[in-house]
Image (cartoon, rainbow, N blue to C red):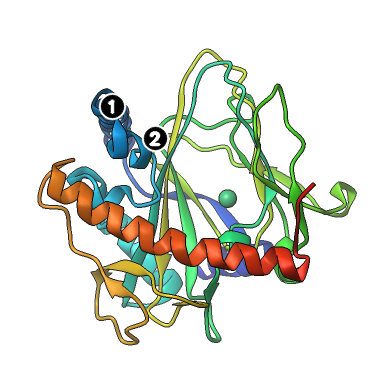
Amino acid sequence: MPTLTQRQLDGFHEDGFIFPVEALTENEAGGLRDTVLQHLADCRRRGGARAALAFGPKVHLLARWAHRLVRHPALLEIAESMLGPDILVWGTQIFVKEPHGSTDLAWHQDALTYDLDAEGRLAAFRVWLALTHTTAENGTMRFAAGTHRDGIHTHRRAPELNGMLRGDEAVLDETEFVRHDVVLRPGQCSLHDMLVVHGSGLNRTEETRVTFAIDYLAPSARPSSGQDSALLVQGEDTHGHFVLEEAPKDDLSDETLARCSDAVRMRMARLQAMEEERKKSGVLTHG
Ligand code: NI
């Protein structure tokens, strides 16, 4: 049975996001927070490609706990009620905000850099799962309601803050939308459309903020150009647009790392070619 109500689904289509959505228990989320921090420490200690790939974009190919998480029954139920019974996972990413850290994210659309096409109905969305409390004070994500309806906005290089790079920034009038801070307790998540404009603030608290993002796709989604891979987590791959990934057999071994690196390289090659196109067409203005 789908876990999302019609009201939640309508809200997603109206605003481009919904939250809070119940997913894990607070206990499960607390355990996962510890696992994530241990994973990051292990990757940092071993260095090299492990350190480079520790945060993503495909943690589910690097460690078994992440592979189990993307198949968590509660998350699959959410994905099924959004996409239907056939489900792929394209990306997984860890977000950590250190106490009093200096990282925030400018307003942006994920679609700018994901370059996925979908026919007709919704074929892709992102789960953003809280493994600690997320609040306005600890730099939670914020959404600009309804901005998924205007296609891809022009983005420019965001001005630096305290010498930190903040990614590409969507050019938009902040007075024209309602802003929503994603306040969640551990185990709850938000869901968002790849076209909705969002960003995040600074962590001004004493606590580390940890979240985990998963990109679920219907098999009808496809890379706009080039080859890419995804993991089938439920049902069938009815379209064959993606090279199918294999579950990791262990955590961080050389073989597992090599498979993850190959998948990430395939994705990055495709997306870099796309970024050049976007610069040529003027959607991305740098400088
Ligand atoms: Ni984003």
Residue 6, percent from left and from top = 52, 70
| Residue at horizontal 31 percent and vertical 30 percent from the top | 40
x, y percentage for residue 208?
46, 21
Residue at position x 37%, y 49% from top? 23
User: Residue 34: which quarter of the image?
Assistant: top left
Q: Which of the numbered marks, if any, corresponds to residue 104?
A: none
Front in this rendered view, residue 211 or 1: 211
Q: Position of residue 22 (x, y in %)?
A: 41, 49
Q: Is 206 displayed left or right of 282 in the figure?
A: left
> Does residue 121 appear to the left or right of 157 in the view shown?
left
Q: Quadrant of residue 254?
A: top left
Residue in the foreground of this view, choosing between 99 and 46 = 46
- How crowded pointer 2 is (Cα within 10 Å; few <14, some 14-19, many 20+) is rated as many
Furthest-left residue in view?
A: 249
Q: How many marks?
A: 2
Residue indicated by mark 1: 34
Kindly indicate whether the residue at mark 2 contacts the one at mark 1 (C-beta within 8 angstroms): no
